Image (tube, helix red, strand yellow):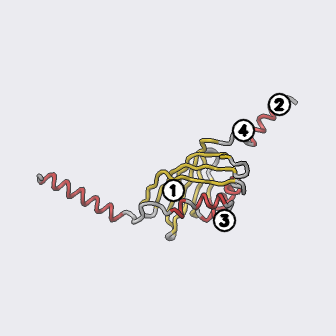
Amino acid sequence: MSTQNRCAWLVAAGVAATLGACSSSETSLPKSVTSGVENAFSRNDAAAFVSLFADDAEIVPGSGPIVRGLPEIGEFFSNQSADELTFDTDTTDQLVREDLAIEQGTYRVRNVKVGKEVESGNYLNVWRKVNGNWKLYRATFNTEVAPKGAMSVADEALASEHTPQ
């Protein structure tokens, strides 16, 4: 091995050792953390849902205004959940570094009373360790499949404006 190659290898080994020493011993989020959102939603438990978030958390929906802070997150949850709805997630990718983690995946909302999936999409969660506990810092999602035949209140108002009286 030439002196130049040996030096390059030593530098690379040193960088790898330094990065390894800086990284957290955790390589993925605990299942109890990643399943917290779906469990709270499926139980329609607003207090448990809000407790998953950091005080300065935000939810960034695919459409609509940003939801900021725990009171707004609680209100957002109350407007999205219902006893007949269950929420299921599949984590597809995670990156954990010290006190910050990114989780990406897909989600599904199912109406158990009628036995049908009513919504599905993708999500991206940014978790941050706060006092040793993983808390949601940022959450965003986009809907791929919305309920068929569903109308928003705005759609109904628009339809009534164009209906002959």
Neighbour tally class for label 3: few under 14, some 14-19, many 20 plus, Cα within 10 Å? few
- Residue type at the position of mark 4: Gly
Numbered circle sitting on residue 126: 1
Question: Which residue does the numbered mark 4 point to in the structure image?
Answer: 149
Can you say whether 26 is above or below 102 in the image? Answer: below
Dots 1 and 3: beta carbons under 8 Å? no
Q: Secondary structure at mark 2?
A: loop
Residue 131 at x, y percent in the picture: 51, 70
Question: Which residue does the numbered mark 2 point to in the structure image?
Answer: 163
- Could you tell which of marks 3 and 4 lies nearer the N-terminus? 3
- Residue type at the position of mark 2: Thr
Can you say whether 63 is above or below 82 in the image? Answer: above
Residue 23 at x, y percent in the picture: 37, 63
Q: Nearer the viewer, mark 2 or mark 3?
A: 3
- Could you tell which of marks 2 and 3 lies nearer the N-terminus? 3
Question: Which residue does the numbered mark 3 point to in the structure image?
Answer: 47
